[in-house]
Amino acid sequence: MELIPGNERAATLIGRTRTAVTLAALVVLSAFATDNATPASALAMGPATVMHDVTTAEIVTTVQPPRTPILKRIKSGFASWYGEVLQGHRTASGRIFDKNELTAAHRTLPFGSKVKVTDLRNKRSVIVTITDRGVLFPDRVIDLSLGAARELKMVSMGVDPVRLELLTFQN
């Protein structure tokens, strides 16, 4: 459209009208749009499969769990351990603390969560269950039970740099 001096208002009005009509048409068309696409997994199956009644037992036995756990890195920092002092006492989750179990205390993770703790000094790993609240020092990210500290070979060190990875998250 040719812009004639004095016709600027009409040109912008026509442009706005065209934009409004286009948007209205898109809204109306999207209301009638349907997704008829066939998933690629259905195309790969070939001919139709024969369906039969499935019992609950078949579902439980035929569904395979994922092969590898999904790891989510939480945090890196220092880990310490505790044992004799709290042996036999109740943890914050209500369980009786056993220094030889593979358990740990964390500030925020829900009780029952499984965490993979990797010692960055010697590359050893252990999977612990969060059963307690704690970590009294600000530079520490987790407090391990004596059993978990033995697995990581960090008992004599007292404090070691670690990496935490969340394996399961309890609600």
Image: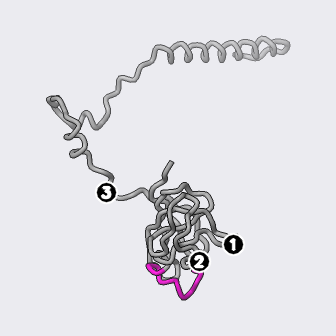
Contact (Cβ within 8 Å) of mark 1 with mark 2: no
Nearer mark to the viewer, of 1 and 2: 2
Q: Position of residue 137 (x, y in %)?
A: 69, 72
Helix, strand or loop under label 1: loop
Q: Is residue 152 above or below residue 114?
A: below
Residue at (23, 37) in percent of width and height: 56
Q: Is residue 18 above or below residue 69?
A: above
Q: Which residues are magenta?
A: 150-160
Q: What quarter of the picture does the N terminus occupy?
A: top right
Q: Are marks 3 and 2 in contact (CB under 8 Å)?
A: no
Label 1 – label 3 distance at C-alpha: 37 Å
- Between circles 3 and 2, the one closer to the viewer is 2
Q: Amino acid at mark 2?
A: Val
**CA distance for labels 3 and 2:** 39 Å
Determine which quarter of the picture holds residue 93: bottom right
Considering depth in this image, is 31 or 5 the residue closer to the camera? 31
Name which residue lies at 20% across and 36% down: 45
Residue 27 position, x and y percent, is 56, 16
- Residue 81 magenta-highlighted: no
Which residue is identified by label 3? Answer: 67
* Neighbourhood count class around disc 3 (C-alpha, 10 Å): few under 14, some 14–19, many 20 upward: few
Q: Secondary structure at mark 3?
A: loop
Q: Residues within 10 Å of mark 2 (few under 14, many from 20)?
A: few
For label 2, the SS is: helix
Question: Callout 3, which amino acid?
Answer: Arg
Residue at the spot of label 2: 85
Taking the spot 63% from the left edge, 66% from the top edge, the residue there is 134
